[in-house]
Amino acid sequence: MKLTGALERVLRAFLADPAADRYGYDLMKVARLPSGTLYPLLARLEAEGLVSSQWELAREDAGGRPPRKFYRLTVEGERVVRLQLAEASLAARGRSIGGIARPSVEGAR
Protein backbone atom coordinates (compact mmCIF):
# COMPACT_ATOMS: atom_id res chain seq x y z
CA MET A 1 0.00 0.00 0.00
CA LYS A 2 1.41 3.37 -1.04
CA LEU A 3 0.85 5.77 1.85
CA THR A 4 -0.17 9.09 0.32
CA GLY A 5 -1.11 12.12 2.39
CA ALA A 6 -4.80 11.58 1.66
CA LEU A 7 -4.64 7.91 2.60
CA GLU A 8 -2.75 8.70 5.79
CA ARG A 9 -5.44 11.18 6.87
CA VAL A 10 -8.18 8.60 6.27
CA LEU A 11 -6.29 5.90 8.17
CA ARG A 12 -5.64 8.21 11.10
CA ALA A 13 -9.35 9.05 11.19
CA PHE A 14 -10.13 5.34 11.47
CA LEU A 15 -7.51 4.86 14.18
CA ALA A 16 -8.97 7.65 16.31
CA ASP A 17 -11.57 5.02 17.30
CA PRO A 18 -10.90 1.73 15.49
CA ALA A 19 -14.10 0.06 16.70
CA ALA A 20 -16.36 2.90 15.53
CA ASP A 21 -18.46 2.80 12.40
CA ARG A 22 -17.61 5.80 10.21
CA TYR A 23 -19.70 7.05 7.30
CA GLY A 24 -18.39 8.82 4.22
CA TYR A 25 -19.38 12.39 5.03
CA ASP A 26 -17.89 12.08 8.51
CA LEU A 27 -14.61 10.80 7.02
CA MET A 28 -14.63 13.58 4.40
CA LYS A 29 -14.82 16.21 7.15
CA VAL A 30 -12.21 14.62 9.42
CA ALA A 31 -9.73 13.82 6.63
CA ARG A 32 -10.48 17.08 4.76
CA LEU A 33 -10.96 15.24 1.45
CA PRO A 34 -13.45 15.58 -1.37
CA SER A 35 -15.73 12.65 -2.13
CA GLY A 36 -13.89 11.97 -5.41
CA THR A 37 -10.73 11.24 -3.43
CA LEU A 38 -12.26 9.54 -0.39
CA TYR A 39 -14.55 6.97 -1.96
CA PRO A 40 -11.93 5.43 -4.28
CA LEU A 41 -9.62 5.12 -1.24
CA LEU A 42 -12.36 3.40 0.74
CA ALA A 43 -13.12 1.05 -2.17
CA ARG A 44 -9.42 0.13 -2.42
CA LEU A 45 -9.14 -0.44 1.34
CA GLU A 46 -12.25 -2.62 1.24
CA ALA A 47 -10.94 -4.61 -1.75
CA GLU A 48 -7.72 -5.23 0.21
CA GLY A 49 -9.71 -6.48 3.21
CA LEU A 50 -8.56 -3.64 5.46
CA VAL A 51 -12.00 -2.02 5.76
CA SER A 52 -15.47 -3.54 5.83
CA SER A 53 -18.69 -1.72 5.04
CA GLN A 54 -22.35 -2.11 5.87
CA TRP A 55 -25.43 -0.14 4.91
CA GLU A 56 -27.39 1.54 7.67
CA LEU A 57 -30.79 0.04 8.37
CA ALA A 58 -33.64 2.30 7.26
CA ARG A 59 -34.78 4.54 10.09
CA GLU A 60 -38.12 6.28 10.49
CA ASP A 61 -36.45 9.28 12.16
CA ALA A 62 -34.03 9.83 9.24
CA GLY A 63 -36.21 12.61 7.84
CA GLY A 64 -36.03 11.32 4.28
CA ARG A 65 -32.25 11.00 4.34
CA PRO A 66 -31.08 7.95 2.40
CA PRO A 67 -29.35 5.20 4.37
CA ARG A 68 -25.64 5.75 5.00
CA LYS A 69 -22.89 3.28 4.29
CA PHE A 70 -20.73 2.72 7.35
CA TYR A 71 -17.07 1.74 7.19
CA ARG A 72 -14.92 0.12 9.86
CA LEU A 73 -11.36 -1.16 10.02
CA THR A 74 -11.12 -4.93 10.06
CA VAL A 75 -8.91 -6.59 12.67
CA GLU A 76 -6.31 -7.18 9.96
CA GLY A 77 -6.82 -3.62 8.73
CA GLU A 78 -6.05 -2.17 12.13
CA ARG A 79 -2.87 -4.25 12.36
CA VAL A 80 -1.69 -3.27 8.86
CA VAL A 81 -2.59 0.40 9.32
CA ARG A 82 -0.72 0.70 12.61
CA LEU A 83 2.32 -0.96 11.05
CA GLN A 84 2.21 1.24 7.93
CA LEU A 85 1.89 4.45 9.94
CA ALA A 86 4.70 3.42 12.30
CA GLU A 87 6.99 2.66 9.34
CA ALA A 88 6.10 5.98 7.70
CA SER A 89 6.83 7.81 10.93
CA LEU A 90 10.22 6.13 11.27
CA ALA A 91 11.07 6.87 7.65
CA ALA A 92 10.09 10.53 8.07
CA ARG A 93 12.24 10.85 11.18
CA GLY A 94 15.16 9.22 9.38
CA ARG A 95 14.86 11.66 6.48
CA SER A 96 14.73 14.70 8.71
CA ILE A 97 17.59 13.54 10.93
CA GLY A 98 19.65 12.49 7.93
CA GLY A 99 18.95 15.77 6.17
CA ILE A 100 20.17 17.81 9.14
CA ALA A 101 23.23 15.70 9.90
CA ARG A 102 24.49 15.52 6.34
CA PRO A 103 26.25 18.66 5.07
CA SER A 104 25.58 19.64 1.49
CA VAL A 105 28.41 18.79 -0.91
CA GLU A 106 27.50 21.75 -3.11
CA GLY A 107 27.58 24.12 -0.15
CA ALA A 108 31.14 23.06 0.73
CA ARG A 109 32.53 24.23 -2.63
Image (cartoon, grey):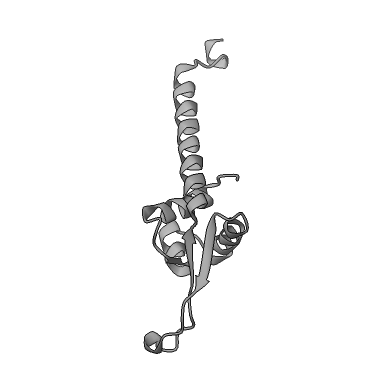
| Residue 11 vertical placement versus 69 (above, below) | above
The quarter of the picture where the C terminus appears is top right
The x, y position of residue 71, in whole percent, is: 49, 64
Q: Residue furthest top?
A: 109
Taking the image as shown, residue 35 lies to the left or right of residue 30, namely right
| Residue 90 vertical placement versus 57 (above, below) | above
The x, y position of residue 75, in whole percent, is: 48, 53
The one of 51 and 23 positioned closer to us in this rendering: 51
The x, y position of residue 100, in whole percent, is: 44, 21
The quarter of the picture where the N terminus appears is top right
The image shows a total of numbered marks equal to 0
The x, y position of residue 69, in whole percent, is: 50, 72
Residue under the image location 61 percent in, 57 percent down: 44
The answer to which image quadrant residue 2 occupies is top right
The answer to which image quadrant residue 48 occupies is bottom right
The one of 90 and 95 positioned closer to us in this rendering: 90
| Residue 13 vertical placement versus 95 (above, below) | below
Residue under the image location 46 percent in, 80 percent down: 57
Q: Residue furthest front?
A: 75
| Residue 104 vertical placement versus 54 (above, below) | above
